[in-house]
Image (tube, rainbow, N blue to C red):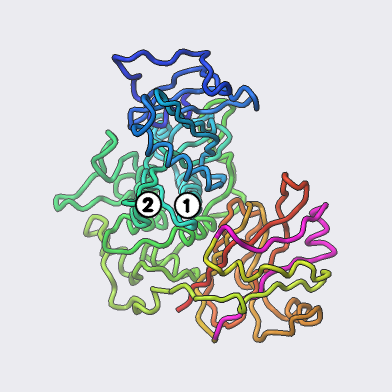
Amino acid sequence: MTHIGDAYASSPSSGEELPTAGRELAERYRLERHVGDDNAGREVWRGVDIILQRPVAIVMRRPGGLNAEEMLRAAVTASQVTHSNLVGVYDAIDEGDLAFVVREWIDGAALREAIFADGPFDAERATYVLHAVSEAVAALHTVGTTHGNIHPGTVLIGDDGRVVLTDARFDTANSLEADMRAVGAIGYFMLTGQWPGSRLGLPEGRRTATGALIAPSKVRAGVPSYLDDMVMDLLNAELTPPPAPVLAAELSRLDTGDQLLFGGAGTLRFADEAPEPTRSPTKLVAGGGIAVALIIVGMVLGIKALNANAENGRNGNGGNTAQSSAGPSPSQVNPQPVKLSANQVRIVDPKGDRTELKNAGATVDGDANTGWKTDGYKNRADFGGSKPGMGILVKLDKPMHVTSVRVQLSAPGATAEIRSGAADQADSSDGDKAIYDTYKIVGSPLVDHPGTVMVFPSDLDTQYLLIWITELPYDKSTDRYRVGIQEITVEAQ
């Protein structure tokens, strides 16, 4: 069985004696097994945190000091972004002759090894992994950083079905766009077993005589058009990729959400027959690829829409797409964030005691480290039962065509929805009740959302939006149910 180190493992280093199993680092981490060296020449070990009695991955560079500066700096940055689809970073230590980073240990395999062992994924598995990767990328992009190292060796699939992204290279030269292109490349690799480039020692994607990349559906039968188009549009340099949170939201609609797609106790092997999905993936009609698909569901992106004949056009050019003269104008495909001030947001608490009204303005101050937080509730039923919820009213300067609302939370596991109404009401218990009674739900709620970034697609002309929370996640540190809203971003045309 392969493990976290095998995400990059080659053969052990030669010419230099490896640290021995049983050695303790920082009087806390005991080395158990050397699993290989990564593509940056660092030794990767399975170890044990002898204080917390849990397995860990230990990544070592020798010597430390300046030689390990980039690794340690990246570890510090990674430790500040917590998400279920990002590998956890626990510690980073420089001892001079040796520097090491302690990370979460994942029992499972790198995506690369999974594809090599079992062949390309079907649509459900590919969508599941793409969704997880895009959620991880969205978490990084939302706090203003990039990953810069997304490839089949840094996507890990746990034996329990969890998918995590690891080994970020937090370099200022990285770009948001490059990360999104890499997400498309991950999709191409899962669907074909080929990498749409020449790096990493992977089988290279097939190309036409003119050098155009051949679409997955032309490499392998059975690839549905919605994945075929999505992957090829993400790889198309002529189309601007969507923001990661928007792509993650759309993939959430398509994802069956069933971790049993990756099953088997102790090994990463797929069942002969996949279980029936809990909900069918949304069928994205029209031949326009990801641009048209996302616009259909109300997400207006920077990808130019293609007309209904684009499928026929792409079949003849090996996957290159062309802009349709019938597509939307630039103003329709380039929504912009709306600048919000503290006096444009307030807390709505229709059945509460109105003691949770402070710091609403911190949700629009541009700083994800500040925000507003609910009180702690002893029972989850106390919030969402006798108290049906509470939220933040956003009052735009004027009626606008809202294309998306992004909400960054302090913890995963909340349930929330977007509502809209025709007018503001008094900042009072009666006014809050009027808002609750008259504002209508827009789109679908996000239930027990697994990430800390919620993206609500919208195709709505309004001036008043209500971010309404109906269920809270459990906070272990306080033994209460609570959540904070750290930042709200409204995009409109």
**Residue type (three-letter) at the residue carrying disc 1:** Leu
- The residue depicted at 62 percent of the width and 50 percent of the height is 278
Farthest-out residue, left: 209
Q: Cβ–Cβ below 8 Å for labels 2 and 1?
A: yes
Residue in the foreground of this view, choosing between 83 and 21: 21
Q: Is residue 437 above or below residue 449?
A: below
- The residue depicted at 36 percent of the width and 61 percent of the height is 241
Name the residue tied to disc 2: 179
Give coordinates of residue 425: x percent, y percent.
72, 84
On residue 140, the disc is 1
Q: Is residue 186 above or below residue 63?
A: below
**Residue type (three-letter) at the residue carrying disc 2:** Asp
Give coordinates of residue 57: x percent, y percent.
50, 28
User: Tag 1, which secondary structure?
Assistant: helix
Q: Is residue 191 above or below residue 466?
A: above
Q: Is residue 326 left or right of residue 3?
A: left
Give coordinates of residue 127: x percent, y percent.
47, 49
Part of the protein shown in magenta: 368-397
User: Tag 2, which secondary structure?
Assistant: helix
| Number of numbered callouts drawn | 2
Q: Nearer the viewer, mark 2 or mark 1?
A: 1
Residue in the foreground of this view, choosing between 162 and 253: 162
Q: Earlier in the sequence, mark 2 or mark 1?
A: 1
- The residue depicted at 40 percent of the width and 36 percent of the height is 71
